[in-house]
Amino acid sequence: LKSKKKKFSNILTSNQIIFRGDFAKQKLDAKPVSFFQLFRFATTCDCFMLSVSALLAIFTGIGQPLICLIGGKLTNVFLLTKTFERNDAFWYQAYIYVYLYASVGITMVITTTIQYICAKNASLNITCTMRREYMKSLLRQEAAWFDQQKTGTLTAQLNANIEKIKDGIGDKVGMILRGVTMFLTCVIIGFIYDWRLTLVMFGTGPISAALLSTMARQTEHSSSMQSSIDGRAAAVLEESIMNVKTVAACNAQETMIRRYAATLKACRKFALHAYAFAGFFDGLFFLVFYGAYLYQIRTITNPGFIFAVANLIMFGSYNLGVLSPHLMAVLNARVAAAVIYKIIDRKPSIDSSSTDGMKVNEVTGRIEFQNVKFSYPTSKEHLVLNGLSWTAKPGDIVALVGHSGCGKSTSVSRKEPLLFSGTIKENIRFGKLDLTDQEIIDACKIANAHDFIDKLCEGYDTMIGAGGIQLSGGQKQRIAIARTIVRNPRILLLDEATSALDAESEVIVQNALKKASVGRTTIIIAHRLSTLRDSNQIIVLDKGQVAEIGTHKELCNKKDGIYASLVKSQQFEEQQKPKSPPVEELPSETFHRSSVRDSHNSSGYGIMSSFTRGSIMSGNVTCVSIPEESTEKSVELNGKIK
């Protein structure tokens, strides 16, 4: 069995498709916060509701033993009164206890409901505040910090840990207070009624306490391990869904299923072990038979006492015995809060929300690098930028070019033009929230996006899906350009803005970029040197330094220069590239664009000679033939617009 497990572990390692850090491991390393720190973000109203919930929980804990007491009194009325003596006085006394029983029951229903509502509302308010503070802290962190985090770990921490905190500070605290109060009340009343029976029923108290202590320690360990394994299982599931196309492309569906199933199987034994002692207190209930013996020898002359004491001890013992899961929920909440607070309390090295320092009232668009040196934390001895110096005047179009690894992308923080789930109008408003509809239309006209948007069924209110999946690459780029234009920035950064587009889309986007660059300092990073002809200044980087600088014409005249060699290399590649007929864009009403990209991602051109572009949404079926030699098509955009 061990050899099989080892072999299976090796299989998982060798067939790993994507790597994801285990956020639950961080939870094990975190020291639990104190109980009162769980309520760190509680408002005055939340504290009031929690206080009301705690008082009502104590009141409910006292009410349950009263029901047992009233039940004992009612038992005495029936058992100590002979049948022929049941007159009006008998029924009057019986009805009094019945009404008391019902009144206490109704009161407990009301108080328990109010207690639950107060606890849940307070916990919801506190965790909502935690979510806001957590997200605020994340968005405040410097970019380098995110490079050190595992994929999906931060969102997994937020979702899993906040739910544990909500569970721990909600009704679980009330249940603990109610259980402890009920146990103490039951013991006190039991000793008042008959101390002998109460002592016998609690004769196993030291054993119970020892086992309860052992159970708490074992449950704590098992719960921590279970939480860790649950985190790994959640990580496997999340990364499988997030990277479903990669999993399918590698034909690794069964591998991911086996990984998920193996993780869940490991969790099962810890869950069983954590609650192995849960039924211990049930054995105490059988000590009620001792009460029957005491009644037989006339040590107890009141049968109702036996009923009352037995029920009191059973209720008290049971409620004390079931507190372990509630205590573990509070402990898990304390551990989860430690992880959440660690992110919330982290002070970024570069705080974008800080009000300290000099405030720039006006940005002119001038950019100047003076002897800049930079290295990445993973390779500090290697300088990516080694004394880089260059200047861009306001309104200039400056291009950074060079071989891979020369430092051009390091000079400009890379960001893809990502779109959000929602409508086209909402995505453009991310650039400026108070935009009018006419301002959005004007920006889209400048970005050459208005025409294709106007052809869509819903126009600017069209839902584009997560990441703009309903749009083509060129359309997403143009919407991103429009979103940038509405901010009216003084500096425009373009990082491979047209590298992933076909020839037709590239021309459209390039024209839009020319319009957007007017009156703004524009920094361009591009491999296609033909797009840099209009640049006022082209800076050629080599080993983190400026190797050449000048216009396109000036640099081409340097026959032995780096830029001239790059131009010749690209011209040669263009000549060797096979020609293929252009694919005209179909009207948006005839197909569903997400299916187009799905076929692009999962099926490589050159494998199939023809395909149907998209799933048909109208009666017209349109097919487009793609020659086998046409292999150049990319669907991922690396362009950057700021």
Image (tube, rainbow, N blue to C red):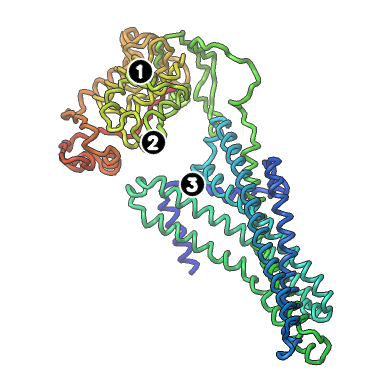
Placement of the C terminus among the 4 image quadrants: top left
- In the image, 128 versus 496, the foreground residue is 128
> Where in the figure is residue 476, as x and y percent of width and height?
34, 29
Front tag of 2 and 3:
2
Check the image and name the residue furthest to the front: 88
- In the image, 474 versus 104, the foreground residue is 104
In the rendered structure, which amino acid carries the disc numbered 1?
Answer: Asp
Instruction: From the image, tell me which residue sits under label 3.
Output: 20
Q: How far apart, in angstroms, are the residues tagged by discs 3 and 1? A: 43 Å
**Quarter holding residue 617:** top left
Mark toward the start of the polypeptide (2 vs 3): 3
> Where in the figure is residue 345, as x and y percent of width and height?
66, 37
| Residue 566 visible to an observer of this rendering | no
The structure residue drawn at horizontal position 15% and vertical position 39%, both measured from the top left corner, is 620
User: Is 101 situated above or below 537?
Assistant: below
Question: CB atoms at circles 3 and 1 under 8 Å apart?
Answer: no
> Where in the figure is residue 283, as x and y percent of width and height?
68, 79
The kind of secondary structure element at disc 3 is loop
Q: Is residue 356 left or right of residue 160?
A: right
Front tag of 1 and 2:
1
User: Is 77 situated above or below 362?
Assistant: below
**Numbered mark located on residue 442 in the image:** 1
Residue density around tag 2, few if under 14, some if 14–19, many if 20 or more, within 10 Å = some
The kind of secondary structure element at disc 2 is helix
**Quarter holding residue 45:** top right
The structure residue drawn at horizontal position 42% and vertical position 12%, both measured from the top left corner, is 520
